[in-house]
Image (cartoon, rainbow, N blue to C red):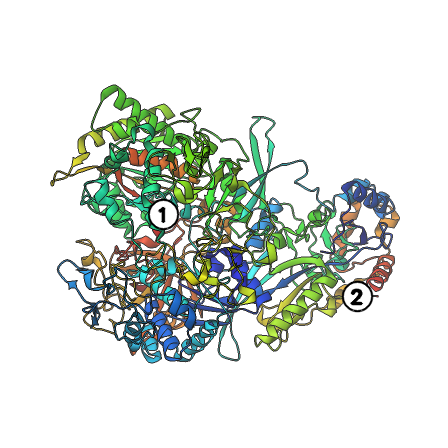
């Protein structure tokens, strides 16, 4: 979230598309009902299904799964055609006026530079034209034919309301009604919030779905605003934290990135990371990259990380490719992975094409499952009849199931989607023989280290020298770790202005990231979390409910990264002179000497407005990007591509149907189905009564939604002779499931490109352990293809067939 | 809130409040804010230490499929196409309405098995329940359920145990969108009016409050988007009244309690009484009427 | 809210009086029986601990009510409710949060370490020492055999690609950082979390 949950109450328009907040985030959705009740907000819901969110919408519009960019592109065109823009904002705060290189183009579904063999682009033409002064050229009138603004206009010319209806099946009148309401927020003092989740990410063009809405929000001047923003609702309670701390193949905590193997040394590595400002006077926050990186390696290896060894640059692995989960299971399936740990994660149910996942797990030498609940993954080798029909004797994998404590017995911090770090305390002792996750990790490290000390082995240095300063090495206390993550001073740093004083004193907690150093005198586990445990104590445990001006910020409740800032890019909430765009949108303002207000400025506090420093200080441009240069693999402007399994082909460019650069492994392409055999569009989702595969272990929730069902519309049900409560079979080219039928008006029949399209909805929550009725997982059906940029599987749009079956139960 | 008794089934009770004037309470269920998440159902089960069986799916979201002795509240889902052609998913939290004039209490033949407090809450007292099922017949909303295990009647208590210590009901506390709120009846009516104004501005011409006079008003009220057609909300009664049979029974017998027979004998008498007779003591009724008049003024 | 607060003591006094005058006594009921019309407030004298709902990333504040189990002496939670002070959820909880007690008490929680050997049909209970020693032995064997110190171009890459780690997304930041340290110090690159699903 760029903003935070409570801030939704400040919205004038709320668009829920690519998510279903009422279903998946009911207590966050409260703030939607608050905005409606007290701010006269309008709620727009666009979804393949009439959802629980839609139940409260002012306008609901159905859409064919996987066609969001066509819809959003249509909105972009509407705003441009009708001049519904926040002009001042677009001109000053985005790259609309920047000139793009000669040579960039888009034709018949492809951007320039495509290489069909490699399924990739040479992105060199997707960039700005640079002046002799080293800065980007721009045309303030935005009339230059190669200005971002004009290129964008040209790109979205094709996205007419008729085309939107043809591709999405969304009725034209509803679409235009929605455009009108969205356009009202082009007024400088009005804002729309965009609430989305996996409904946008789980597509082969997921990142571009989000980009498309970001473009709309920038054209309307809604980023950095109270009641505005791009708000990823996020999934698990600490998925934000796990991502912030970099538990991904290519990450270092705080969104630093691991080296690629083409970067043999630290100097080479830094060349592509310390972005230089692209416009005069801009900040480009990443100039501090080295301070964050060195402080991180100091927190890992302490004294062993020295200037002479480039602060252990070589002790971190360097990547040849990114090992995301889809690649991990592909390699496992090929027999190239021997050991696998699942910590609170149930991949047998969570990843696409279950048959492939089960086959991959069976090729492991060892599998370690660390979980408070009995997961299906831990039992992938156990026969559960039709729900897990395997031959145990033929599976050679050694499997360990390690019992952990659960939330109630755990202390520490979680980061919510509004970037708040909140501390929690244990309310019960660890039951049975359960152990905390921290203790298990500590034991694994200490035992591995002991083995290397005893036996020696390959490159043991990073294991042997890992900083392990805990009072009880086997039981690090969460407070000790939190202090490490915040960062601490290793050596005194004198005050440059007064040699008698010290800027930093050895042993002290870091007060924040601003003083982190690249000379090895500071250590910091995760720079964006610096400030969470300062010399003043644990900021995450703060419980001051005060909320000045009832703004929805609660600035002294817990702690928000970065620097306790509650709304990102908040400089954009004020006009060029530093005055708020409207009295109800006040966040920060220029008082003549400094930026001040309700929130911590996301900006140099002494930057005078007339200096023209852009509000988007993380970008070297200082402005937000309507055109992303080469930063996205699949194009600088979002373009509509069909899901890999499509019922109609791509009406916008018939030769390039699906995302031309989305990664597909050999063998997976072959098991995509076609509309001939699988005529219906399927989408998977969560229900509010359940949470992934956990709550089926919870008796109350099992009783509230006991059994797997599939939703289908009345027309399709009639055609197939399926009645409410009948058993039905749903098949894709990868497998099939049996489920109860829920026949509902909420699944509407659409007409796309002249064809009737039926959609089928499949909730994901059932399996073969827990308190509910046993059920098939939706991943028996889903295709193994990920988003072109971040490899999120395409769970939201694929093809199936359905039939009525008779089950004797 | 002191829970003073206003009425008891099948007995005479001193009327009025011993702790001074009490305020009527109410739960307001705003269907236009309800997302049907079932948090109320979960909170109800958890607070009351009840658990529901794991059932099956029958082609709808409603689970369990009806109120039970354990599930005292239940979301009921209706898909309705409105006059303007738009689909509406109307989700109604069903459960005891805590009628001002409770048919269950009037129908109940067992002394003190059903009580009504001066704040309006109608409560079942398990120890005094004989499981005759009269309350089910007397209820205009078909709410009480008889347990298969102990043959006693169960329904929502409006969390009298929480209200007693100054807290709201568990469902209202949990409700994520605050579609369920709790307070004095007057405050809830005022709140409903602001919601109705908002709904009318959004095009729901017939939005209104459901507080049916046929049962003297209720201590659980609804904001309905279409108050002219309560039936479309999963069959909510349009003009509920207590069955005339119950009125007929009223006052037919002198209170058995007064003749001083014991519980065992009482049960025997009720075996006879299940043929029809049943009553609330006239003194109780008079006192209750007085209390209601006092509050209305 | 127009609800008056009356102490429990007052309440019992009032209702006690009321019941005493009622026909219950005529029937031989003790006055306590009428008091039983209102269930005793179950949170009296419980210990309260603040925590965060472990499910979605709204991260609602919760209060866990616990007591010591007289038999084991261990602290046990018997009720969980929303934290009314919390600025986001204001005491509310969804159907999952409202039922968290049954997560804590789930019959299908893992209780002790289990192990299943190659081809075996069932888990068997093992000690923590057995499990942790065996796992680290397997890790070291695999790492020593397959660790890549230099790539074909001769660049130091120090990566281990044959054992992978899928991290949780409901564990604390502190667990996350310790996990990061353990995983990255070993050179593992097959490393991901739940962000995508």
The numbered mark 2 sits on a residue in which chain?
B
Image quadrant of residue A390?
top left
Q: Position of residue A692 (x, y in %)?
A: 41, 50
Q: Can residue B222 be seen in the rendering of this structure?
A: yes
Residue at left offset 87%, top offset 52%: B14
- The Cα atoms of the two marked residues, 2 and 1, are separated by 65 Å
Above or below C66: residue B101? below
Q: Residues within 10 Å of mark 2 (few under 14, many from 20)?
A: few
Residue A199 place in picture, x, y as percent:
38, 60
The image shows residue B163, relative to residue B225, as above or below, that is above
* A322 with respect to B65 (left or right): left
Report the front residue among C163 and A711. Answer: C163
The correct choice, above or below, for A156 with respect to A589 in the image is: below
Q: Residues within 10 Å of mark 1 (few under 14, many from 20)?
A: many
Q: Nearer the viewer, residue B218 or A121?
A: A121
For the residue labelled by badge 2, is the local secondary structure a helix, a strand or a loop? helix
Q: Quadrant of residue C116?
A: top left
- Residue C170 in sight: no
For mark 1, name the chain: C
Task: Pinpoint residue C109: horizontal percent, then vertical percent.
Answer: 45, 37
Q: Position of residue C166 (x, y in %)?
A: 32, 42
The residue that disc 1 covers is C194
The quarter of the picture where the N terminus of chain A appears is bottom left
Q: Residue furthest top?
A: A454
Closer-to-camera residue (A763/A639): A639
Provide the residue designation for mark 2. Answer: B248
């Amino acid at each position: 979230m760029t903003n935070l949950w409570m801030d939704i109450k400040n919205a004038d328009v709320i668009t829920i598309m690519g998510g279903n907040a009422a279903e998946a985030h009911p207590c966050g959705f409260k703030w939607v009902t608050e905005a409606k009740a007290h701010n006269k907000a309008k709620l727009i819901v666009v979804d393949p299904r009439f959802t629980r969110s839609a139940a409260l919408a002012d306008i609901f519009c159905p859409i064919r799964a996987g066609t969001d960019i066509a819809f959003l592109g249509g909105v972009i065109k509407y705003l441009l055609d009708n001049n519904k823009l926040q002009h001042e904002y677009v001109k000053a705060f985005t790259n609309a006026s920047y000139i793009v290189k000669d040579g960039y183009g888009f034709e018949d579904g492809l951007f320039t530079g495509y290489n069909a063999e490699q399924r990739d682009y040479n992105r060199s033409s997707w960039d700005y034209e640079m002046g002799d002064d080293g800065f980007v050229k721009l045309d303030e009138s935005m009339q230059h034919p190669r200005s971002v603004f004009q290129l964008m206009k040209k790109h979205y010319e094709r996205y007419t309301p008729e085309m939107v209806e043809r591709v999405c099946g969304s009725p034209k009148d509803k679409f235009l009604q929605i455009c009108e309401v969205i356009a009202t927020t082009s007024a400088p003092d009005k804002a729309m919030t965009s609430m989305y989740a996996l409904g946008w990410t789980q597509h082969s063009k997921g990142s571009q779905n989000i980009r498309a809405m970001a473009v709309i929000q920038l054209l309307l001047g809604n980023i950095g605003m109270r009641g505005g923003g791009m708000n990823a609702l996020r999934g698990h309670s600490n998925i934000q934290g796990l991502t912030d701390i970099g538990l991904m193949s290519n990450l270092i905590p705080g969104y630093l990135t691991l080296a690629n193997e083409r970067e043999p040394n630290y100097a080479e590595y830094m060349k592509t990371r310390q972005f230089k400002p692209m416009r005069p006077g801009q900040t480009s926050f990443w100039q501090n990259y080295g301070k964050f990186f060195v402080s991180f390696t100091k927190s890992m290896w302490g004294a062993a990380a020295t200037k002479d060894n480039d602060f252990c640059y070589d002790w971190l692995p360097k990547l040849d490719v990114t090992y995301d989960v889809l690649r991990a299971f592909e390699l496992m399936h090929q027999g190239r992975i021997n050991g696998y740990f699942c910590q609170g994660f149930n991949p047998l149910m969570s990843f696409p094409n279950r048959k492939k996942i089960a086959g991959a797990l069976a090729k492991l030498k060892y599998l370690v499952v660390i979980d408070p609940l009995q997961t299906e993954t831990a039992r992938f080798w156990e026969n559960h009849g039709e729900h897990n029909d395997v031959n145990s004797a033929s599976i050679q994998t050694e499997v360990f199931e390690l019992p952990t404590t659960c939330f109630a017995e755990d202390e520490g911090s979680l980061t919510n989607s509004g970037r708040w770090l909140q501390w929690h305390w244990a309310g019960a002792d660890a039951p049975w023989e359960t152990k905390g996750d921290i203790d298990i990790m500590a034991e694994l490290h200490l035992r591995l280290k002991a083995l290397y000390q005893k036996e020696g082995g390959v490159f043991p240095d990073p294991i042997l020298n890992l900083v392990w300063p805990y009072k009880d090495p086997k039981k690090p206390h969460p407070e000790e770790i939190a202090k490490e993550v915040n960062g601490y001073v290793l050596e005194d740093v004198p005050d440059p202005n007064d040699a008698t004083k010290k800027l930093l004193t050895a042993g002290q907690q870091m007060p924040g990231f601003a003083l982190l150093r690249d000379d090895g005198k500071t250590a910091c586990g995760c720079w964006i979390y610096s400030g969470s445990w300062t010399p003043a104590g644990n900021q995450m445990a703060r419980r001051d409910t005060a909320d000045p001006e009832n703004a929805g910020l609660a600035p002294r409740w817990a702690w928000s990264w970065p620097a306790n800032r509650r709304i990102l890019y908040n400089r954009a909430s004020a006009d060029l002179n530093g005055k708020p765009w409207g009295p109800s949108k006040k966040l920060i303002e220029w008082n003549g000497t400094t930026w001040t207000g309700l929130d911590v400025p996301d900006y140099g506090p002494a930057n005078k407005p007339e200096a023209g420093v852009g509000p988007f200080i993380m970008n070297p441009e200082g402005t937000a990007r309507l055109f992303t240069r080469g930063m996205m693999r699949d194009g600088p402007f979002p373009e509509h591509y069909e899901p890999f399994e499509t019922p109609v082909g791509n009406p916008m460019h018939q030769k390039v149907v699906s995302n031309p650069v989305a990664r597909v492994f050999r063998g997976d392409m072959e098991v995509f189905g076609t509309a001939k055999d699988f005529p219906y569009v399927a989408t998977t989702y969560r229900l509010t009564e359940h949470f992934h595969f956990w709550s089926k272990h919870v008796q109350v929730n099992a009783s509230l939604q006991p059994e797997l069902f599939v939703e289908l519309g009345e027309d399709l049900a009639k055609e197939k002779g399926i009645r409410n409560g009948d058993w039905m079979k749903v098949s894709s080219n990868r497998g099939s499931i049996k489920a109860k039928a829920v026949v509902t008006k909420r699944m509407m029949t659409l007409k796309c490109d002249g064809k009737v399209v039926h959609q089928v909805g499949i909730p994901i929550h059932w399996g073969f352990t827990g308190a509910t009725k046993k059920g098939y997982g939706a991943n028996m059906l889903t295709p193994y293809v990920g988003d072109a940029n971040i490899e999120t599987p395409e769970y939201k749009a694929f093809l199936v067939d359905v039939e009525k079956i008779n089950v004797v139960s | 809130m002191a829970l003073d008794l206003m009425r008891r089934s099948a007995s005479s009770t001193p009327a009025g409040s011993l702790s001074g004037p009490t305020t009527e309470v109410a739960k307001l269920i705003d269907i236009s804010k309800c997302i049907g998440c079932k948090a109320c159902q979960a909170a109800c089960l958890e607070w009351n230490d009840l658990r529901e069986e794991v059932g099956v799916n029958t082609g709808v979201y409603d689970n369990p499929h009806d109120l039970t002795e354990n599930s005292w509240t239940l979301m009921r889902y209706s898909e309705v196409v409105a006059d303007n052609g738009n689909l509406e998913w109307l989700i109604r939290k069903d459960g005891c309405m805590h009628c001002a004039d409770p048919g269950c209490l009037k129908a109940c033949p067992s002394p003190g098995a059903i009580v009504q407090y001066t704040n309006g809450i109608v409560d079942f007292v398990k120890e005094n329940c004989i499981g005759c099922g009269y309350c089910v017949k007397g209820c205009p909303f078909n709410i009480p359920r008889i347990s298969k295990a102990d043959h006693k009647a169960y329904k929502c208590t409006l969390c009298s145990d929480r209200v007693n210590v100054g807290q709201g009901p568990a469902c209202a506390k949990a409700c994520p969108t605050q579609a369920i709120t709790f307070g004095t009846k007057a405050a809830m009516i005022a709140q409903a009016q602001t919601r109705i104004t908002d709904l009318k501005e959004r095009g729901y011409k017939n939005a209104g409050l459901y507080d049916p006079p046929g049962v003297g008003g209720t201590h659980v009220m609804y904001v309905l988007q279409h108050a002219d057609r309560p039936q479309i909300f999963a069959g909510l009664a349009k003009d509920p009244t207590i069955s005339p049979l119950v009125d007929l029974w009223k006052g037919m017998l002198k209170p058995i309690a007064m003749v001083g027979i014991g519980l065992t004998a009482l049960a025997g008498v009720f075996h006879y009484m299940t043929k029809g007779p049943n009553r609330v003591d006239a003194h109780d009724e008079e006192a209750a009427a007085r209390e209601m008049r006092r509050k209305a003024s | 809210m127009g609800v008056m607060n009356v102490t429990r003591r007052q309440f019992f006094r009032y209702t006690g009086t009321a019941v005493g005058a009622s026909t219950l006594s005529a029937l031989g009921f003790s006055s306590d029986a009428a008091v039983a019309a209102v269930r005793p407030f179950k949170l009296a004298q419980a210990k309260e601990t603040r925590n965060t709902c472990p499910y979605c990333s709204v991260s609602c504040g919760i209060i866990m009510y616990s007591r010591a189990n007289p038999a084991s002496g261990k602290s046990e939670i018997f009720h969980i409710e929303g934290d009314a002070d919390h600025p986001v959820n204001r005491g509310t909880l969804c159907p999952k949060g409202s039922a968290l007690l049954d997560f804590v008490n789930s019959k299908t929680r893992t209780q002790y370490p289990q192990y299943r050997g190659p081809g075996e049909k069932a888990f068997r209970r093992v000690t923590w020492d057995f499990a942790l020693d065996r796992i680290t032995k397997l890790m070291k064997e695999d790492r020593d055999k397959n660790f890549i110190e230099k790539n074909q171009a001769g660049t130091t890459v120090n990566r281990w690609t044959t054992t992978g780690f899928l991290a949780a997304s409901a564990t604390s930041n502190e667990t996350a950082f310790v996990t990061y340290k353990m995983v990255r110090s070993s050179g593992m690159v097959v490393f991901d979390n739940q962000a995508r699903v």
